[in-house]
Image (cartoon, grey):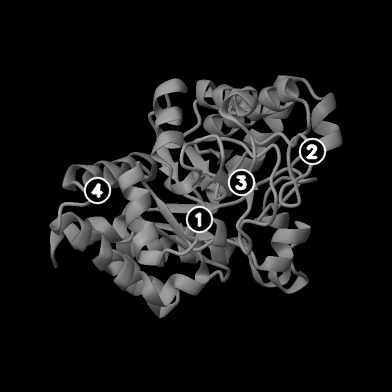
């Protein structure tokens, strides 16, 4: 196989809602894929409650078997999921319970960190090595996407909890991810299905970077980009494909870890682009790991080929592709 094609596959991050490897996922891993997100369905995402049949059927033994199968095919790999307070905890009853938000606000940093460490240790024992948490967004006002799904509405308190969460995960030996950079204090719609915007200037947005800064200083391994369109950059661009916002993360916040896009097939991110164009644009902008929804699973080969073509025609420097793949390797090893 073309070595550039294996590199391209390694930057793709497909989501599956099932705790098994489909033929498409097996082929993906055999071709160089290194990362899978075990997600939830739309209802579970909206409510934060896992279906009773999932709770019944997903056991520690099942997780171990799937994790072993992934690493048996791919070697070191990223196996990721959400573990959110106020939103989705994908592992439901299989780990120690996360604290509630009301409990979290009253906890000392040490007590909160201990709760996160205990949960994360359980997740690590199941084969997970990256949590797509904590949420570092702070909601200011109208927000149909994230209202009720964050760690609070006070920037200083959210910063404290984000840093404590990251420390707990790090003590457990598992990676953590800050989302959804650069923050979405206000948003005009649902990014998955609408062209949702964050109608704020950079000066207005900058105070909401504080929880991300706190998480980075605490040692977060990854940052997850927003899918929304940001008026803070010129011209306005979706966070997941914005060179300006990724440069803000890298330079102003001095983040040197793994940069992960939100679902690149979200309406806000794709706009009028094709998915293969969006994937290439995200890499060019500086993203490392490219999240795509379950609907894109049959098209992973097409997306990988599009990345290779972009290298071959000079739109995507080979060094940028190699850098993205290396960043993934550092977290998965």
Circle nearer the viewer, 3 or 4: 4
Q: Are marks 1 and 4 in contact (CB under 8 Å)?
A: no
Distance between mark 2 and mark 4 Cα atoms: 38 Å
Front tag of 3 and 1: 1
Q: Earlier in the sequence, mark 2 or mark 4?
A: 2
Q: How crowded is mark 3: few (under 14 residues within 10 Å), some or many (20 or more)?
A: some
Tell me: residue 65, above or below residue 124.
below
N-term-proximal mark, 1 vs 2: 2
What label does residue 321 carry, if any?
Answer: 4
- Tell me which residue sits at (55%, 23%) in the image: 213
Q: Do the residues labelled 2 and 4 touch (CB within 8 Å)?
A: no
Return the mark for residue 141. Answer: 2
Instruction: Tell me the residue at 47%/47% (across/down).
Output: 240
Secondary-structure class at tag 1:
helix
Nearer the N terminus, badge 3 or badge 4?
3
**How many C-alpha atoms fall within 10 Å of the one at disc 2: few (<14), some, or many (≥20)?**
few
Per the image, the residue denoted by label 3 is 122
Select label 2 or label 4 by which is in front: 2
Residue at the image position 43 percent from the left and 42 percent from the top? 242
**Front: mark 2 or 3:** 2
Under circle 3, the secondary element is: helix
Alpha carbon separation for disc pair 1 and 2? 22 Å
Residue 168 seen in render: yes
For label 2, the SS is: loop
Horizontal placement of 98 versus 309: left or right? right
């Amino acid at each position: 196989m073309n070595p550039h094609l294996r590199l391209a596959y390694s930057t793709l991050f497909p989501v599956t809602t099932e705790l098994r490897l489909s033929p498409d996922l097996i082929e993906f891993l055999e071709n160089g894929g290194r990362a899978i997100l075990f997600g939830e369905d739309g209802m579970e995402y909206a409510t934060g409650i896992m279906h009773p049949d999932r709770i019944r059927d997903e056991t520690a033994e099942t997780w171990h078997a799937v994790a072993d199968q992934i690493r048996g095919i791919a070697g070191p790999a990223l196996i990721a999921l959400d573990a959110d307070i106020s939103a989705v905890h994908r592992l439901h009853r299989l780990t120690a319970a996360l604290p509630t938000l009301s409990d979290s606000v009253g906890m000392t940093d040490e007590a909160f960190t201990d709760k996160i460490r205990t949960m994360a240790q359980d997740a690590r024992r199941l084969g997970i090595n990256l949590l797509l948490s904590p949420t570092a967004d702070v909601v200011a006002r109208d927000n149909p996407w994230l209202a009720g799904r964050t760690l609070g509405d006070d920037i200083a308190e959210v910063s404290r909890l984000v840093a404590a969460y990251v420390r707990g995960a790090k003590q457990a030996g598992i990676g953590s991810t800050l989302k959804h950079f650069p923050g979405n204090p206000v948003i005009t719609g649902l990014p998955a299905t609408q062209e949702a915007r964050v109608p704020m200037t950079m000066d207005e947005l900058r105070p909401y970077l504080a929880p991300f800064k706190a998480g980075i200083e605490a040692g977060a391994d990854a940052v997850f980009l927003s899918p929304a369109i940001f008026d803070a950059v010129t011209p306005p661009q979706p966070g997941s494909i914005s060179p300006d916002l990724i440069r803000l993360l890298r330079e102003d916040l001095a983040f040197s870890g793994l940069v992960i896009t939100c679902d690149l097939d979200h309406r806000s991110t794709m706009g009028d682009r094709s998915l293969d164009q969006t994937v290439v644009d995200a890499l060019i902008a500086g993203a490392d790991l490219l999240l795509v929804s379950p609907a894109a699973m049959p098209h992973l080969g097409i997306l990988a080929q599009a990345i290779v073509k972009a290298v071959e025609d000079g739109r995507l420097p080979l060094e940028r592709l190699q850098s993205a793949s290396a960043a993934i390797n550092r977290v998965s090893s």
